[in-house]
């Protein structure tokens, strides 16, 4: 996947020609997309690399992207309540447990501590309302946001990138 470039430039605030990549990158290998689907996909791939099944990882990716959007909205004064609490002082960890015998109640991913529920044998991230986030709607969102062929290429490129790092190095804070 060498040469594939994800360009999260916002086109709404700048002329189309200013958002185009440099001539050194072939046009067929450039994808211009908003940051939310890119962050959702990246966080899902990090969660998968940390050992979560893909369908559960998609929910974690959505939760991270939602949390980041909520925090941005709060900084801009658009909203006042972040989706999940973050813990910048806690070291990144795959799962946070209150007691070794209990199920985890939260997962820390990319600096975002999110509530989880065990559904069947899987831990699923929960929305701000407490409902488990399932992977299928998130994958549909990503396919629509990227476009089906570009989604697969972006997923492969980011997967290849994620494989170049140790899992603990991937799970650093996003903000």
Image (spheres, rainbow, N blue to C red):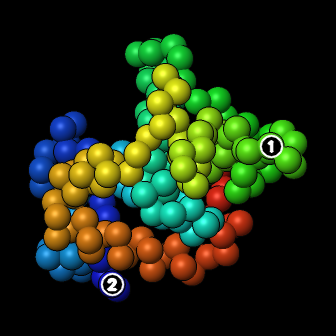
Residue 44 makes an appearance in the image:
no
Of residues 31 and 111, the one nearer the viewer is: 111
Q: Which image quadrant for residue 149? A: bottom left
Residue carrying label 1: 102
- Disc number lying in front (2 or 1): 1
User: Mark on residue 94?
Assistant: none
Q: Nearer the viewer, residue 60 or 120?
A: 120
Determine the image quadrant of residue 115.
Answer: top right
Q: Residue 5, relative to residue 139: is it above or below?
A: below
SS at circle 1: loop
Rendered position, 45 above or below 145: below
Give the CA separation, mark 2 to mark 1.
Answer: 42 Å
Residue 108 showing in the rendered view: yes
Q: Please indicate whether residue 87 sits to the left or right of residue 33 in the image.
A: right
Q: Which residue is mark 2?
A: 1
> Which residue sits at x=27%, y=74%?
153
Residue 34 picture location, percent across and down: 29, 47
Identified at 60% across, 44% down, the residue is 118
Q: Secondary structure at mark 2?
A: loop
Pinpoint residue 5: horizontal percent, then vertical percent: 31, 71
**Nearer to the camera, 160 or 131:** 131
Neighbor class of circle 1 (other Cα within 10 Å; few <14, some 14-19, many 20+) is few
- The tag earlier along the polypeptide, 2 or 1, is 2
Residue at image position (58%, 30%) is 84
Q: Position of residue 92 (x, y in %)?
A: 74, 53
In contact (CB < 8 Å): disc 2 and disc 1:
no
- Which residue is situated farthest in the bottom direction here? 2
Quarter of the N terminus within the rendering: bottom left
Badge 2 local density, few (<14 within 10 Å), some, or many (20+)?
few
Where residue 78 appears, as percent x and y from the top left, is 41, 16
Residue drawn 45% across and 15% down? 79
Q: Is residue 86 above or below residue 64?
A: above
């Amino acid at each position: 996947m060498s040469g594939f470039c994800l360009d999260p430039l916002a086109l709404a605030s700048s002329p189309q020609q200013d958002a185009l990549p440099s001539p050194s990158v072939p046009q067929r290998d450039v994808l211009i997309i908003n940051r939310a689907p890119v962050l959702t996909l990246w966080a899902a791939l990090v969660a998968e690399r940390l050992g979560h099944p893909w369908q559960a990882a998609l929910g974690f990716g959505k939760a991270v992207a939602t949390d980041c959007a909520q925090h941005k909205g709060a900084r801009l004064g658009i909203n006042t309540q972040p989706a999940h609490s973050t813990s910048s002082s806690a070291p990144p960890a795959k799962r946070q447990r209150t007691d070794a015998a209990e199920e985890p109640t939260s997962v820390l991913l990319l600096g975002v501590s999110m509530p989880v529920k065990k559904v069947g044998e899987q831990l699923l991230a929960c929305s701000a309302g407490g409902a488990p986030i399932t992977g299928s709607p998130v994958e549909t969102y990503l396919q629509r946001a990227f476009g089906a062929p570009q989604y697969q290429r972006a997923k492969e490129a980011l997967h290849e990138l994620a494989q170049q790092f140790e899992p603990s190095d991937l799970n650093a804070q996003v903000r």
